[in-house]
Amino acid sequence: MKISRLHIEQFARDEFPTLSEDHVGGDDLLLVGGNRSGKTLTFNALLYGLYGPRATYGVSPGRTSEVRFVFDNGDRLIRGGSGRSYSHGDDTFETDDADEAIAEFIGAKEIVSHQFIPSEIDELPLATLSESDRLSLIRRVMDSELEEEIEQLREQRDDLEADIESIERTELRPRREELDDIDISRYESRLEKIERLQSLIDSGRIETIKQRLLDNNDLRDRLEELDDRRHAINQDLRKKKRKLRDRRRYTDEVNEIILDAISELTCPVCDQIVREQTAEQRLQNGRCPQCGRDRSLEELKLDLRSKIDSADEEIEGLESDIEELRGEKEEIENEIQSLQDSVPDLSDLRDLTIHTLKDNDYDIDAVAEETQGRLEQHRTTIEELSTQKDQLETEIEEIEEQLSELDDALTETESRIQELSQESFEEIIVSFREQWSENYQLMAPDLAVEINLRPDGTIILPGNDGPREYDELSTGEVRLLNISFVFTLVQEATERDDQGHNLELVAMDEPFANIDEELRENTIEVLRESNIQFIITTSNGDLTQRFDPDQVKSLNRMHIQYTLDEIEELAADD
Amino acid sequence: MTDDETHHPRLVLLDEADGHIEGRAKYHKLLFNYADEEADETTLTFVREERGPYDPGLSQAMQRYIDLGLMDVEEDEEPHEVEQTAKGQRYMSGYERAKMRLDESFRQTKERIRNTVQKHGDKSASEMVDEENVQDAKENPMRKELK
């Protein structure tokens, strides 16, 4: 399928000259013009006409633009500010249906848009495609079913990875944290103390203890004082420990702290948190992990870094405070012990006993009642915590089993992707590479080198000082490599009728800059002799000699309509 | 699904309290009062700790908000004042505007939290501990999850 007639009107700028070519007839078309003659705009207009504004290289088409194509099979495509329509036979498709018809009758945007070779080196197809995308594109053109299968497996792999990440984050991690928080031993040791007090009550020894304390005011006051101090130390210890836990957070790397922190914030629109993997990639690429925009996070990172820098010192300080408090507590406990040892009948006295007696004003009935209540409470708590712990352990085990199954499925999917990629490399990529090398050698016989496309998608060309990768090539080589790549791609696609690709067209914007005359002539010869339609823009008038006069269209310089003063006036009117 | 799932009730509470709460203990108690008196079903859970109801997730959430620069805690003086930062204020303003337009139930959560702040915001943590519902909660064994 080629373009027979072409009409472009008011594309992107009011001064854009209407381009109406009714006699293209599927032949090549050379658009020649100097600076500001609209060559790049025309190139973008073709892309816009096929796939809409997002397909262009950053050109906004404007509301009054219109692009019309008539193809050599009679199909028609119109796109403009008022919408798009595609006619095939007696059927006409509008809006979304038109998009579907374009994909069906012309080809998918993901393939066809690479048939448009822009002038900027950074925007050339091989520069914008990642290594793996290069292979995917070739596979898609050469064997779309295989690529579809690999693509489905990749989606399956991504879903599995997302499931694993989500289960780990939302199900496993919170349960593990909850389990870590359950400290049954604390309650067991407390219960032991309560039970000891209960035994003193049961045996009646509490009465003797009470009497000894009431008989010895100094001893009682000192014991109460020490008990109060111990209580205050315990409270202080709890606070310091919490602070220590908070500070220990800052022994992580800055990025890890940010990634953990954003897991607290959901998006107000979708109510989801950003996937950890996505957030991590964004951060690594210098973007905001939450919104993905290219924002400087320096202020936040500096703040966190200063916390990290001071964390070690603070942790050390807190640890030493905690150590000191523990020492003080031990001293108090030793003093209590020695006071107890100094008085007969007080050897059974424990901190809880002093505390409970004091709290209940030495009323034994009240002490007994409180102790009974505490016993019940603690036994219930321990029972509940044990049940909770067992339940969490069972749940964690189940989740781990589920994760292990998902991991197995992931490994299997990955190995299938590898297997298919390897097979496809041997059967498909190698064959494409040979054809590409052949075309490249035809276009540049003097360079006459073989292209090596590796299984990871890296492109290697030989050089005098050893192999050279894509970004080590000269600008001319890069251009020729891209032209030969796209040319091979369309050749291969055209040979295959069942790959959902029908457009035998390559459009190029100033393709021969930095290419010497001899190479340029060779390349044009190869292109002109092929059955593929070429639409080329150029500022080089010499190229017209290689085309029939009716295949050449001269573009005139677009005039600037306004002076700076007029622009200011227009802006003021707005 | 709970009524306030994905509504960030802890952040909304600080925002409704004009970005200022006098101490962690008060923060826990205000959240408890919201859950106990206003919310039908909430994502927040509470356990009985020494000084009554305690939100076990608050500490980690606060730490994350602090790391993102949305909140600050004045550690030098007691009680440790919890402050919403200017960035936190901007975030909540945008978040709430979006939520109000997209999620009808958010308005209800916000109103419930506002009621809690109006009713208890001026009280100290100790005053709230003395109140009946907190005392009732303290009847439970330590670490028990409060329903």
Image (cartoon, coloured by chain):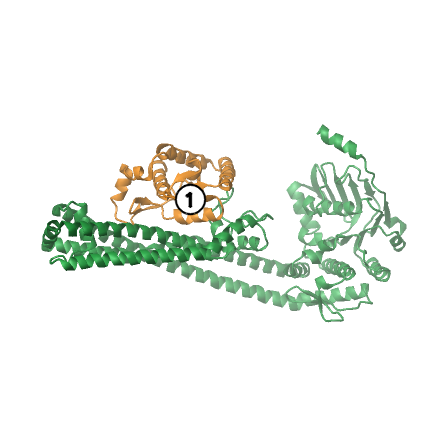
Chain colours: A green, B orange
| Residue B94, placed above or below residue A279 | above
SS at circle 1: strand
Q: Quadrant of residue A83?
A: top right
**Residue A88 seen from this side:** no
- Residue A352 placement (x, y as % from top left): 20, 53
Check the picture and name the quadrant holding the C terminus of chain A: top right
Q: Residues within 10 Å of mark 1 (few under 14, many from 20)?
A: few
Return the chain for callout 1: B
Q: Residue at 16% of width from left, 52% of height from top?
A: A219
Instruction: Judge whether A343 appears above or below A362 on screen.
Output: below
Residue A188: % across, % down: 24, 57
In front of the other: A239 or A229:
A229
Spot the residue most to the front.
A218
* Left or right relative to A39: residue A134: left
Q: Nearer the viewer, residue A444 or A494?
A: A444
Residue B34, quarter of the rendered image: top left
- Residue highlighted by disc 1: B74
Residue A403 visible within the image: yes
Q: Position of residue A111 (x, y in %)?
A: 68, 54
Disc 1 marks which amino acid?
A: Glu
Q: Nearer the viewer, residue A476 or A523?
A: A476
Disc count in the image?
1
Who is closer to the viewer here, A265 or A367? A367
Q: Residue at (72%, 31%) from the top-left corner?
A: A571
Q: Is residue B24 left or right of residue A219?
A: right
Q: Position of residue A147 (x, y in %)?
A: 62, 60
